[in-house]
Amino acid sequence: MADTKPEFSSYPEKSPPKTLIVDLSMKYGGSTSRVLSQLSRFPKEQVALAGLAESAITREAQKLDLPVYIVGRRKFDPLIIRRLIHIIKNEGFQVLDSQNIQSKFFASLASTFTRTALVSTINSWYSSEHGGSSIKGWIYTALELATNWNLSLYITVSEKDRQALLRSGLEAGNIELIYNAVNVEKKDLRGYGWLHRRLNLPAERLLCTAVGRLVAIKGYDVLVDAAMQACQEIPLLTCVIIGEGNMRGELVDHIQKANLVGRVILAGYFDRNDVLAALKSSDIFVMPSRYEGTPIALLEAAALACPILASATGGIPELVINGEHALLVPPDNSSALAEGIVRLCKDRDFANYLGSKAQKYINTKFNLESQTAATLHAYQKAWSIHHQKRLNVFK
């Protein structure tokens, strides 16, 4: 009778398995910062990135001399699956960690053909991010759950998203909650006034800065309405929105109709160093989002002691306490947001108190060393779960 033993050892390795992070996004976002920060701390021989040619994450990884494999030129390049399989087999990867829905689709197929473990990192639950009535949110959520045939583990970045997975029928033991983290090298930052000079603004202007993609979920239309109210009480106020996205044209029209040209500035895309310099130069960091996971930009603002005004939505209240580390207001409420802006502009002692407390808290609780260790542990857990499932097949 033929030998029916599986092709792998009886027990998985005790050291973290060799892992390929699959990120097929083109633009820079919060998840990009998360992956790059972790890759810079993972052992190079143990964890690598698979990305698209000329994508933001691929370019940044190459600049930082991080291990990266090019698997295609666009999100739905038909050669992606073949290249992924080739890389996995040639380099001996044992775990795939997908970072978004397009990545999950290809990683699910590749993991099936290569008998690797599959991890899905949820940076923001799709139905929450795009709205419960959004067709896009519904399709993304359905596709996420439909590609779980070979899934070993989920990683979420907020308790809110973990609860969404549990409601979808996932077992608690197959979900790891690992909050985002940041590490800001303050010695390399430019000082206060850099953003004023970059945007050619008078030095006395008070800067209220937001960072993120120009998309509906970020709530920048709400910020424009809030600025219209706040500027009446704070004549020196200027709101700066850093980022690009498909709502630029709509926001430009909104700013013009509100007669806020020059008072609300769409500054465009900044690289990470310039984002940090901008936050260091700002009097307030504002995040008017309708939903967030655990936003990297908010953590970076806190690490720089920039006073935070944010929506009490998604995972934000898990990161900061209202009145202690930040000022939190209801989402989609321009009046509450305007009141928060005015208060932090007028009461600078309170604003500085929030910034100082947030900096100490974030640096202690949300550090990259703990996040990296937890993620490596999650990869080991995923490999063990996958390994045990395969052993059970042969029993």
Image (spheres, helix red, strand yellow):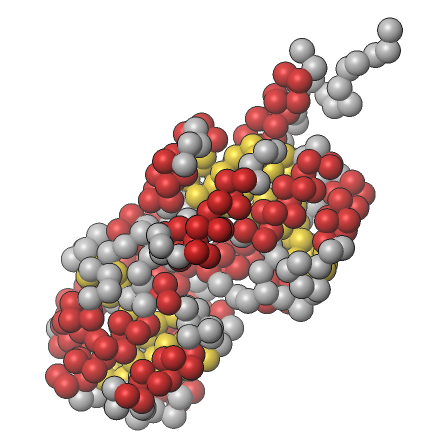
Which residue sits at x=32%, y=63%?
289
Camera-side residue: 315 or 198? 315
Expressed as whole percent of the image width and height from the top left, the position of residue 293 reads 38, 52
Vertical arrangement, residue 74 with respect to residue 371, above or below: below
Quadrant for the N terminus, please: top right
Expressed as whole percent of the image width and height from the top left, the position of residue 383 reads 61, 31
Vertical arrangement, residue 344 with respect to residue 364, above or below: below
Camera-side residue: 97 or 348? 97
Using the rendered image of the protein, determine whether residue 126 is visible from the camera's viewpoint. no
Camera-side residue: 116 or 168? 168
Which residue sits at x=23%, y=77%?
225
Using the rendered image of the protein, determine whether residue 54 is visible from the camera's viewpoint. yes
Vertical arrangement, residue 160 with respect to residue 344, above or below: above
Which residue sits at x=65%, y=52%?
49
Quadrant for the C terminus, please: top right
Q: Residue furthest top?
A: 1
Which of the 4 image quarters holds residue 292? Answer: bottom left
Which of the 4 image quarters holds residue 304? Answer: bottom left
